[in-house]
Amino acid sequence: MVNMIANWTDDKTAKFQKEIFTFKHRLAETGLFTDEALIELLEKHPTDMLDVCTMGGAKDTLYPNKFRTGDFRDASGKVMLEAAKAGCIWINVRRAMNVHPEYKAVLDSMYGDLGALTGNTVFNAKGGILISSPIAKVPYHFDKTETLLWHVRGKKRVYIYPLTQEFISDEAHENAMTSYIDDDLPFHEHFNQSATVIDLEPNQSAVWPLHSPHRVDNQTFCVSVTTEYSTRESGMKNAAMITNSVLRHRLGMNPSYSRDGDITRKVKSVFGRVIKKAGILPDTTGVDLVTFKLDPNAPGYLVDTEPYERTF
């Protein structure tokens, strides 16, 4: 298989996982991201690992600025793809790069090349495929694991923000790790003055430091691969944040990961893993309610429904 990564330099190796930069890739050359290939993928992917979502507009009386889950079971792969091109939905084909052998071979090649270039050969990466409408947006959030965005089709604008308390406070990070909130973060428009803005073109990847807050605006219909993997650093920090959350919410303390020394961080990391395994964290996942269906005969391909629990 052809090398998946192009135009890599020693400078990029030095910056990897530390700074924001882009590089070229060759995923499109695999033929696995054409309309025909994506339709076939959508037809065969397990339904419990496929999400079709939209977001209510600011003036939506029922779901203003809220994520909405859709029922796609009566829609063909072709209809799903057409809906993404014409409407306001995004399709998350979760772990597509791991489940299907032809995509898994590409994922292995991607990270084999990345390992050879960076010296990090232990990734155990997971990869999903995002198929999204021209006006789809991903709100301000952070990723709990090391994440790379491999853009394949369309134009996408990525805003990446500084890794400081102003943009991602310890408390917000702690809450996300303990399910008090999801990965979304409080956002203010003036944050944009400090953002690094990347206009991603096809066959371009973006890299940023672990836990950097970011958001995404599509400029056109887009197809991207998102890959994630855990490292010792991400595992230790996330576990320590669990301990800090318990100290803050249960004991009224004001912990700070940034002020902790290495030994304190390691001790908190151990306790965080114990807390997580003990199952004492609050369960705030809630019920995933379906509020629309895909319908090729409806405007925008969406038809509102009475809410019902997703069981597929």
Image (spheres, rainbow, N blue to C red):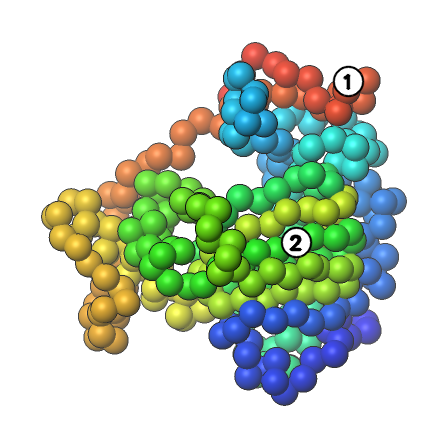
Q: Secondary structure at mark 1?
A: loop
Quadrant location of the C terminus in the rendered image: top right
Residue sitting at x 53%, y 16% = 61
Q: Is residue 47 left or right of residue 189?
A: right
- Give the number of marks: 2
Q: Quadrant of residue 135?
A: top right
Q: Position of residue 267 (x, y in %)?
A: 21, 68
Q: Quadrant of residue 97?
A: bottom right
Disc 1 marks a residue whose amino acid type is Ala
Q: Secondary structure at mark 2?
A: strand
Label 2 neighbour load within 10 Å: few <14, some 14-19, many 20+? some
Q: With respect to residue 159, does 284 lie above or below?
A: above
Q: Is residue 143 left or right of residue 221?
A: left
Report the residue marked by disc 2.
157
Residue sitting at x 40%, y 70% = 233
Residue 134 in sight? yes
Q: Are marks 2 and 1 in contact (CB under 8 Å)?
A: no
Quadrant location of the N terminus in the rendered image: bottom right
Q: Is residue 181 left or right of residue 34?
A: left
Residue sitting at x 23%, y 56% = 244
Residue sitting at x 77%, y 18% = 298
Report the residue marked by disc 1.
298
Q: Position of residue 160 (x, y in %)?
A: 53, 59
Residue 311 in sight? no
